[in-house]
Image: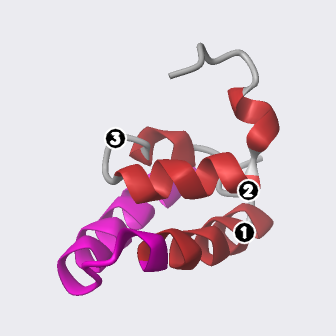
Amino acid sequence: MGWSSGSSLMSDCIRVLKREVPDAKVRQRIYVGMIKAFESEDADTLDECHGDDPAFLAADREVNPGMFEDEEPA
């Protein structure tokens, strides 16, 4: 059973990182580690944060590529 407040907490973290870390590639690397840590604690609603930062979405695609298999190519 997951914890839905994970997306709220992640959204708060994303807001801080976007303000403090201007480089999107650096944020993406940070998000990869954060996504893995949150998911290891059973956070299961992080997809709610996809619109918060394109770097977060890219990180989630990197960590969970199977979740995006049905997407139309850009």
Residue in view at x 37 percent, y 69 percent: 24
Q: Secondary structure at mark 1?
A: helix
Q: Amino acid at mark 1?
A: Lys
Question: Measured from the top left, where is residue 13 in percent x and y?
Answer: 36, 73
Question: Measured from the top left, where is residue 29 in percent x and y?
Answer: 57, 76
Residue in view at x 35 percent, y 60 percent: 11
Res 39 quadrant in image? bottom right
Q: Is residue 2 inside the magenta stretch?
A: no
Q: Amino acid at mark 2?
A: Val
Eyeballing the image, is 40 above or below 74? below
Task: Tell me which secondary structure the magenta stretch mostly adopts.
Answer: helix
Residue wearing tag 2: 63
Res 22 quadrant in image? bottom left
Q: Amino acid at mark 3?
A: Gly
Are discs 3 and 2 less than 8 Å apart at CB? Answer: no
Residue in view at x 41 percent, y 47 percent: 49
Q: Is residue 32 left or right of residue 26?
A: right
Question: Measured from the top left, where is residue 55 in percent x and y?
Answer: 43, 58
Tell me which label, 1 or 2, sits earlier in the chain.
1
Residue wearing tag 3: 51
Q: CA gap, disc 1 to disc 2?
A: 7 Å
Q: Secondary structure at mark 3?
A: loop
Residue in view at x 54 percent, y 51 percent: 58
Q: Residue furthest front?
A: 74
Eyeballing the image, is 50 above or below 36? above
Q: CA gap, disc 3 to disc 2?
A: 17 Å
Range covered by the magenta-colored residues = 3-26
Are discs 1 and 2 less than 8 Å apart at CB? Answer: yes
Q: Is residue 25 inside the magenta stretch?
A: yes
Residue wearing tag 1: 36
Crowd band around label 1 with a 10 angstrom C-alpha radius: few (<14), some (14–19), many (20+): some
